[in-house]
Image (spheres, rainbow, N blue to C red):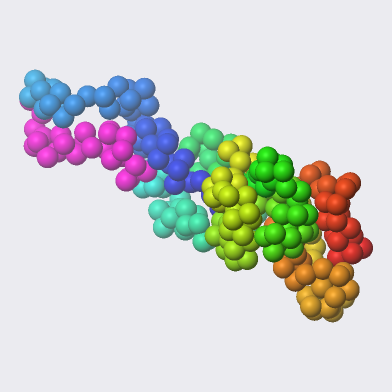
């Protein structure tokens, strides 16, 4: 689903929109915006303006950037000649529409905001990921990963996966992730927080086509588990967590991940 940044951009460009709808230059509006309410009252008095204080206050509020955001969509509607209701539909993140059908409106909105059309589209949100320092902490304790797997009760290939792949941060609280990590921490005498590397990482883009394989072959997950000689938990892990193929161990005991992946997706 495509999401648009119309609300965000309209608020950001509110002085431009006010300029387009009022005929006052954006530069002048920005200058007026730094004036205080008292300044406006003094100016009104000096000019003998027949405006009440509430009227002066309203002008001030419109020029105040934070308060002006409340009328940003209304101003965008007037500047782009597109109804306010229609623009609000585009702003709604749940609005699922065909860009091809709305391209004329998007051109008008982009012109009013003085941005390229592509800038109206929100980039996909990147999900937070974490790198686990299991191998590093195990080495400091003089423990091999295979021994750590045995002592913690965590399936060795899963432990290798945790040690080599970015893990979606939200999954750390899910089962069986949480219990597995607690058991690892007991052996390493550390906390789950201690396991997390401070280095920022992003989830890789590669996903294994496990679900597609099941649909194409008619196999069940249990049957795939039997045929690939691995656990249901490992299959679920590689099916739901993106994989950085560059970090998959290709030698030693940890190369078991690659062997199992080849069995799951020949």
The quarter of the picture where residue 176 lies is bottom right
Location of residue 18 (image quadrant): top left
158 with respect to 261 (left or right) = left
Give the residues drawn in magenta, as a range: 48-72
- Residue 192 coordinates in the image, percent (x, y): 56, 51
- Quadrant holding the C terminus: bottom right
Q: Nearer the viewer, residue 256 or 91?
A: 256
For image coordinates 37% across by 43% down, the residue present is 72
Image: 91 above or below 224: above
Q: Is residue 226 visible?
A: yes
Residue 205 visible, this orientation: no
In the image: residue 42, left or right of residue 156: left
Residue found at the very far front of the displayed protein:
142
Q: Is residue 108 rendered to the left or right of residue 64? A: right
Q: Residue 190, percent across and down?
A: 56, 48
Residue 59 is covered by the magenta coloring: yes
**What residue is shown at x 67% (from left), y 43% (from top)?**
141
User: Which quadrant of the figure has residue 228?
Assistant: bottom right
Q: Residue at x 42, y 36 (%)?
A: 12
Instruction: Pick the residue in front: 78 or 125.
Output: 125
- Main SS of the magenta part reads helix
Question: Residue at (83%, 51%) from the top-left corner?
Answer: 254
């Amino acid at each position: 689903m495509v999401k648009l940044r119309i609300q965000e951009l309209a608020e950001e460009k509110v002085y431009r929109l006010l300029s387009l709808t009022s005929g006052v230059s954006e530069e002048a509006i920005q200058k007026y915006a730094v004036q205080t309410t008292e300044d406006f009252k003094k100016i009104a008095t000096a000019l003998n303006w027949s405006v009440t204080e509430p009227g002066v206050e309203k002008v001030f509020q419109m020029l105040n950037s934070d308060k002006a955001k409340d009328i940003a969509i209304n101003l965008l509607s007037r500047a782009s000649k597109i109804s306010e209701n229609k623009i609000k539909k585009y702003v709604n993140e749940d609005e699922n529409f065909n860009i091809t059908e709305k391209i004329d409106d998007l051109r008008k909105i982009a012109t009013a905001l003085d941005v390229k059309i592509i800038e109206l589209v929100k980039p996909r949100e990147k999900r937070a990921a974490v790198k686990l320092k299991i191998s590093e902490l195990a080495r400091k304790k003089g423990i091999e990963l295979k021994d750590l797997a045995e002592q913690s009760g965590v399936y060795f290939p899963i432990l290798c996966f945790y040690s080599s792949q970015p893990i979606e941060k939200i999954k750390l609280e899910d089962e069986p992730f949480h219990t597995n990590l607690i058991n690892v921490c007991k052996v390493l005498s550390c906390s789950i927080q201690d396991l997390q590397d401070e280095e920022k990482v992003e989830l890789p883009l590669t996903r294994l086509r496990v679900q597609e394989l099941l649909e194409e072959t008619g196999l069940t997950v249990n049957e795939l588990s039997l045929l690939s000689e691995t656990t249901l938990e490992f299959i679920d892990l590689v099916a739901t967590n993106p994989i950085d193929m560059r970090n998959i161990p290709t030698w030693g005991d940890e190369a078991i991940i690659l062997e199992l992946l080849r069995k799951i997706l020949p």
